[in-house]
Image (spheres, rainbow, N blue to C red):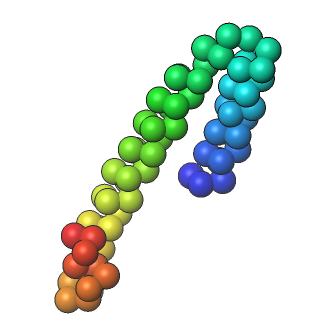
Amino acid sequence: MGIGYAVLSGIEAGRVAHNVLTGSGNLVSAYAQSVAGHFARYLELRAAYYRMEQRWPDQPFWNRRH
């Protein structure tokens, strides 16, 4: 997910920058919402994957993530 999202968000950021420099800048809000949505989904997926790991329940690293 990381590399693909980096490329996609870079393309979107370029479009937003172009829009700000040559147009109304009306894409900024939509881009910010998109980034926030992707980050929220990332946090959900990360938490789900960490919850799946059950091999080391007594280790501090995993205790903090469960």
Would you place residue 25 above or below residue 5 in this image?
Answer: above
Q: Quadrant of the C terminus?
A: bottom left
Left/right of residue 43 with respect to residue 25 in the rendered view: left
* Quadrant position of residue 48: bottom left
Closer-to-camera residue (34/27)? 27
| Residue 54 appears in the picture as rendered | no
Q: Where is residue 52 in the image (x, y as percent from the top left)?
A: 28, 67
Q: Residue at x 38, y 53 (%)?
A: 43
From this viewpoint, which residue is outermost toward the top?
24
Q: Which residue is drawn at 68% across and 10% down?
A: 24
Q: Where is residue 39 in the image (x, y as percent from the top left)?
A: 45, 45
Q: Position of residue 8 (x, y in %)?
A: 67, 39
Count of all numbered marks drawn on residues in the image:
0
Would you place residue 58 above or below residue 8 in this image?
Answer: below
Left/right of residue 48 with respect to residue 10 in the rendered view: left
Q: Residue at x 20, y 89 (%)?
A: 58
| Residue 43 appears in the picture as rendered | yes
Q: Where is residue 62 in the image (x, y as percent from the top left)?
A: 28, 79
Closer-to-camera residue (39/55)? 39
